[in-house]
Structure formats: structure tokens, C-alpha cells
Amino acid sequence: MNRKLFLLAILPVMLVGCSGDGEEKEILPVEAQDIKMSSDFIQVEKGKNVAISATVMPGNAICKDVIWTSSDYTIADFIDGGVVGFSKGKCSIFASTKDGKIKKECKVEVTPVKISAIDLGGNKMKIFEGKSLKIDYEIYPSDAENKNVIISSSDPNIVTVDPDGKTLHAKKVGKAIITLKAEEGGCVACCDVDVVDVASMINFIYNSSIPELYGYVTGSFVLTAENEIDENVEMTRFEIIDSKTQAVVFYIDDASKLGVIKPHWGDGLYLDITLNHVYKPIMVWYLKYHNKEYKGSGWLMPGVGSGDVVIPE
């Protein structure tokens, strides 16, 4: 009889412990068993921040606090949720439980600041045949450790790069692509280079607007021919052709009205022009430079305002 009473007495306790279908069980806190880090290796550039995280396991650990330390604070440290690089080198970042019983390591390599952008101030340039041009460019960021930029030409027959790595030599008329590549980091910038003869170095300034109606030009206006190279160039003839009939409808070959175009803005050659019902006029100019003759051409552009510069294409 006593044995039966004892069994009845413990039965309710056993039922409570075994029951629980659909019921939540209380999860009791336990000691930390591990730390899970998001990365065990990080490469970070000097001055940059790379995110990293650490989670104490299991999820019901008594204390989930993580203590971050560095093997060399002069190289890198954990700040604001990430590893910050201070100087080039290698070290380790550690994540530890508050009691120090568990510690995980993330190896860190801090790399120097690299060039991230090269600014040429544009992606096109024009060089006079036989001349040299030093390339001006800026690198970003300015505190990049390795500032060396390698310059190369897609066609050395057209443009060559001087051994100093910064000067271009225009060999003959044509087109080439100049590529600037950071020695470290792989940043690249390109520029289209057009090597031209003397005829393409003459630009025209429209001193007055050009009257035009349905492509036909009628009226008088003044053009100024400007010399873009650093030597005198002689213009021996200037003419305008009607693009529909291909007839020469205007020309100047009088030496007293033409002559030398000096290499300075403002010292150009003034051309007084009168046209009558000329369809989409084409300008043609003849030059003499170093005892050689050159010919250039380009569209006369009706509607261009006074003072605008037109570079022949």
C-alpha cells in the first residue's frame, strides 16, 4: 500500500515534465561555448574601414558581450563595427568573451593607399605633327603611397612616349590612344590623341553671326583665322564652295588681304566675306609652312554667334 501511494505522488511531476506538445519550454542560460566571426582574414587599405562582426554562441549564452583587441594598435584596430587600417603591415584582431575564456582571431593586412582616379582634364587632345607635349594629370587621392603612372601609346608610329614617361612626341598625322595606368592598384585613364598637320591648327572666330535660311547663306560677315601653333603660318588662298553645286563661289588670293597668321590669339587674319544664296558653305584654306604647302577644309556654320570659336573637323 505504501508503494502505491508513492507512485501516485510522483506521477503528476512526471506528467508535467513530459508534457509540452505545442507549449514553449523555458531555455535556461548557459556558459558561452564559442564565438562566430564573420571573417578570419581582412585586407584593408590604410585609412579605410572594413566591417567585421562576432557573435557569442549559443544564442542563450549568459553573457554575449564581445571584447575587441589588436595585436598592434599602430597597424589596425576595431572601431565602429569594423577594422580600421592605420599603417602598412600585418597584425591580428581578436574577439573575446568578457571572461576571456574564448578568443577568436582575424588576421589583418593593411595595404598602402592606392591611386583610385587619374584626371586628365579631358579625354581628347590635339598635337601638331612633329611637336612634343607634356601630359598634365592629377591623381586621387593625393596621399597615394605609390604615385607612379605608366603612360603608353596604342600606336608608336603616330605618337611615342618619351623615356621620362610624361612627354608625348607626335610622329605623323593620325590617331592613337594614350593610356595612363597606375603602377599599383590598376587604375586606368585613356585619352584620344589626334596628330594633325598645320592646316588643322588654324581655327576660325566668327566676328558676327552668319545669316542663314533653309541651309542657304546670304550676306556679309567677318571671320578671323587664328594660329594655334607657336610659329608663323602663311595663308596663300581662302575660298568657299557651295556644297550642292561644288562650285567655288568666293575666294581671296590677294597677298595683301591674306599673308602671315601670327602664333598669338588676337593677332589673327581678318577675312571679309560676302555670299549670295550659297547652300551649306564649305571653307577651304591653303597654307605655306616651312616651304611646304597644306590644305584644310571645314563647314561654315550658319547660326554660330559672334565671338564663338569653330575648330575645323
Image: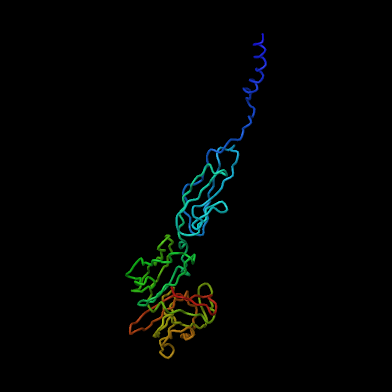
Furthest toward the bottom, the residue is 256
Q: Residue at 52% x, 40% y: name it.
A: 34
Quick check: 123 above or below 305? Answer: above
Q: Where is residue 86 in the image (x, y as percent from the top left)?
A: 50, 59
**Observer-nearest of 241 and 229:** 229
Q: How is the image coloured?
A: rainbow
Left or right of residue 306: residue 112? left
**Observer-nearest of 274 and 117:** 117
Quick check: 199 above or below 182? Answer: below
**For the N terminus, which image quadrant?**
top right
Q: Position of residue 239 (x, y in %)?
A: 42, 81
**For the C terminus, which image quadrant?**
bottom left
Q: Residue at 59% x, 44% y: name it.
A: 65
Quick check: 184 above or below 225? Answer: above
Furthest toward the top, the residue is 1
Quick check: 170 above or below 34? Answer: below
The mark tally for this picture is 0
Q: Residue at 46% x, 56% y: name it.
A: 110
Q: Position of residue 299 (x, y in %)?
A: 45, 75
Q: Where is residue 135 in the image (x, y as percent from the top left)?
A: 42, 72
